Image (cartoon, rainbow, N blue to C red):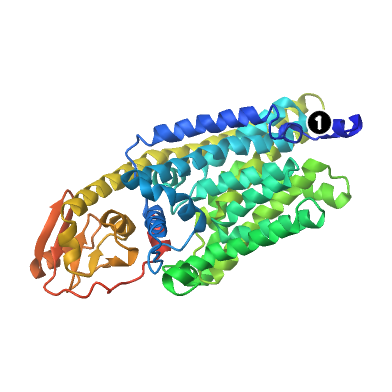
Amino acid sequence: MPNSTLSKRVASGPAAARGRPGGRSARPFALAAVALAGLAAVSLLAPFAPVFDPWGWLVWARELGHLDLDTSAGPSWKPLPVLVSVPFAWAGEVAPQLWLFIARWGWLAVAPLAGVLAWRLEGSRGRRAAWAAGLAAVGTLLLHDSFTPWARQFAGGLSEPLLVTLVLAAVLAALARRPVLAASLGWLVCLIRPEAWPFAAGYAWREARAGRLRAWPVAVGAVLVAVLWFGPDLLGAGDALEGARRAREGTGSPPAEALEVFGRAAELVPAALWLGALWAGALAFGAVRAGTAGERERATAALAAGALAWIALVAVLAAGGYAGLPRFMAPPAALACVLGGVGLVRLFGALRARRRGAARGAAATALAVLLAAAGLADAGLRAERIPGQLAEARDFAQGVDELFALAERDREALLACAPLATTDLVVETALAWRLEVPLHRVEYSGPVAPRRGTLVIGPRAAPGVGTLARLRGRPVGAEGRWSAYRAPLCAGSGSAASSAGVTGARR
């Protein structure tokens, strides 16, 4: 390689010069991955349990291992978590912990990758500026989700933190001019969220046209994405769109949901970082329009446009009846945190460059203090909620343990009189996992006491349900805050009702 070309590669930034497999930079990344894996393993000692969606994925993974898949009930189908969990199904009771390890590793990797990306976008402006941008980008951990808090996602093993990790890694690979790795990571992203499809397809198409990717693997990957999303529902429920139909259950008014998406997106990221992101995006788009944009400006503009487009896509889907939950916008929110860190550094730099004498430092200092105060206040309010969120997660896990003890001791009695229902939607999939039955065998009773079958009553039961169940039926078993009663009538085991995965996953 000519020296001039090598110099350009080195000058283009840390990630471009050091991101090669087997190079010096591969070792720090590998060590960081191992360290994060260690932290994820230690986190398994915490008294937390998976939430609604992961239990459903584990049930489906077990059924795939036995070639007996039934997706007619439960959360909406999501290929990557289920496929990753298939080997875990053979581990028995350890399977939930193995999934939590993968999910929490992804959660822990978000902040370091956000910092590296901020460094990559800001590295040419000096080591201190790059460090400042990276530290500000760690504000990704302060994402606020009014439906499923970020700390709750860590405790319960949801897939969105892993999704953000894959998105950030794909962006870094693309900036390092490693299209095969970037496209592969993008393909994995597509197996978690359908909103990623147009972005991954656009990148792969561009790289294939430029000759940096072969066309046939891109085409095969696109076909596999479609097969893995729609094929299991076709085989396991008789309808390729079963998951899409269930994803639309439990939502509010579609027009209102669409408008609320933008408000939820704004709440996800600290206000100071949104200000920085707007500044970084404005500078980048201005440079692109003027034809003076370098690599970093073009990357910043592309990331800003992509983040806004992702949020808009979630809003469009919400208008179509799908849930516009905040966690569906976790990737653009993470990118906003990165761009916010970069933008704040550039904003302070612009103030210093345009002021003279004592006023130069005073103006920059005043703005820095103001933004720091606002950021600390915002972070304080978010951090104040974390103990309560973790306490709720511990309480949920304790309830799951009690429920599992009941299911293990009285399994035959619970399944003897169908249908089996529970008053707590959030543990419906967990109970199916522990009883080793398909998801459709456990129903949600709603706010009433069924007149037939077996009812498992939990701490979140509607008022009066327990009293009616005790008056109508006879006790089957009890453990902690859980009790089970058999109604006078029993139905056939084929009686079933689908579950609204969106509603259950909000916890």
Residue ID for mark 1: 10
Quadrant in the rendering for residue 485: bottom left
**Is residue 462 at least partly visible in the picture?**
yes
Q: Is residue 363 above or below residue 180?
A: above
Q: Quadrant of the C terminus?
A: bottom left
x then y, percent, for residue 267: 53, 50
Classed neighbour count for the residue bearing mark 1: other residues with Cα under 10 Å, few (<14), some (14–19), many (≥20): few
Q: Position of residue 338 (x, y in %)?
A: 64, 41
Under mark 1, the amino acid is Val
- Which element type, helix, strand or loop, lies under badge 1? helix
Work out whether 411 lies above or below 116. Answer: below
**x, y percentage for residue 392?**
33, 45
Location of residue 359 in the rendering, given as x and y in whole percent from the top left corner: 76, 28
Q: How many marks?
A: 1
Q: Residue furthest top?
A: 358
Residue depicted at x 52% and y 45%: 143
Q: Would residue 371 be visible to someone looking at this image? A: no
Foreground residue, 424 or 403?
A: 403
Quarter residue 18 falls in: top right
Quadrant for the N terminus, please: top right
